[in-house]
Structures are given as structure tokens and as C-alpha cells.
């Protein structure tokens, strides 16, 4: 599990997504991640960060990911593989 933190901004304890990253993928415009939220009252699931606007959207339903042209082509991997350099 990892936190995604923007070094330029002062983020809460859970980073940009306010939770831990379990799966992650990206392209030039978006970061897409499956997040376990820090607060138990918040919904775990898929969240996307728009790299141009810095806006986070989500949770996003799996069915919506498949039909969203901006997000559907992003290939996601386990965060441990990505951050260890295996992907």
C-alpha cells in the first residue's frame, strides 16, 4: 500500500487520494487508482486524478470505467509492482 503525494502541495495524511493506493495506472492526462480510503465512512474504490486541473473524481463504478474514453485505456497494476519497478 502506498500514498500518492504531490510534493508541491501540503496534502492530508492520505495524500492526493486521501487513502492508500492498491492499484494504479496513468497516461499523460490522468492517474487512475483503486484506493482504500482512510476514513471508514468514505467509499473505497476507483478514483482518478486529472493531472491538468488537479481535480480528483470518484468513486467511479467499474462499469463507468469501461465506457469512459479518457480512463478506459489506462492499464492498472498492483501498486507494489509499480513502485518496486516491476511494471
Image: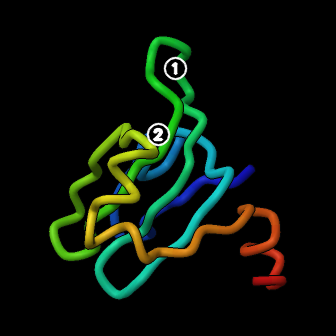
User: Badge 1: how crowded within 10 Å, few (<14), some, or many (20+)?
Assistant: few
Q: Check disc 2 and report its element: helix, strand or loop.
A: loop
At horizontal 23% and vertical 63% (from top left) the residue drawn is: 54
Q: Quadrant of residue 2?
A: bottom right
Q: Position of residue 75 (x, y in %)?
A: 56, 74
Please tell me which of labels 2 and 1 falls first in the chain.
Answer: 2
Nearest to the observer: residue 28 or residue 61? 61
Q: Check disc 1 and report its element: helix, strand or loop.
A: loop
Nearest to the observer: residue 20 or residue 71? 71
For this view, does 63 lie left or right of residue 3?
left
Q: Quadrant of residue 38?
A: top right
User: Badge 2: how crowded within 10 Å, few (<14), some, or many (20+)?
Assistant: some
86 lies above or below 80: below
Q: Position of residue 72 (x, y in %)?
A: 39, 68
Report if the CB atoms under discs 2 and 1 are less than 8 Å apart. Answer: yes
**Residue at the far left in the pictured view:** 53
Residue at the disc numbered 1: 39
74 lies above or below 5: below
Residue at the disc numbered 2: 18
**Gap in angstroms between the C-alphas marked 2 and 1:** 8 Å
Q: Position of residue 62 (x, y in %)?
A: 45, 45
Amino acid at each position: 500500500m502506498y500514498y500518492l503525494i504531490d510534493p508541491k502541495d501540503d496534502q492530508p495524511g492520505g495524500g492526493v487520494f486521501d487513502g492508500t493506493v492498491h492499484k494504479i495506472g496513468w497516461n499523460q492526462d490522468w492517474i487512475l487508482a483503486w484506493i482504500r480510503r482512510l476514513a471508514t465512512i468514505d467509499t473505497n474504490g476507483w478514483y482518478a486524478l486529472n493531472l491538468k486541473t488537479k481535480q480528483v473524481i470518484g468513486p467511479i463504478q467499474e462499469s463507468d470505467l469501461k465506457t469512459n474514453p479518457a480512463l478506459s485505456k489506462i492499464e492498472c497494476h498492483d501498486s507494489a509492482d509499480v513502485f518496486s519497478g516491476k511494471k
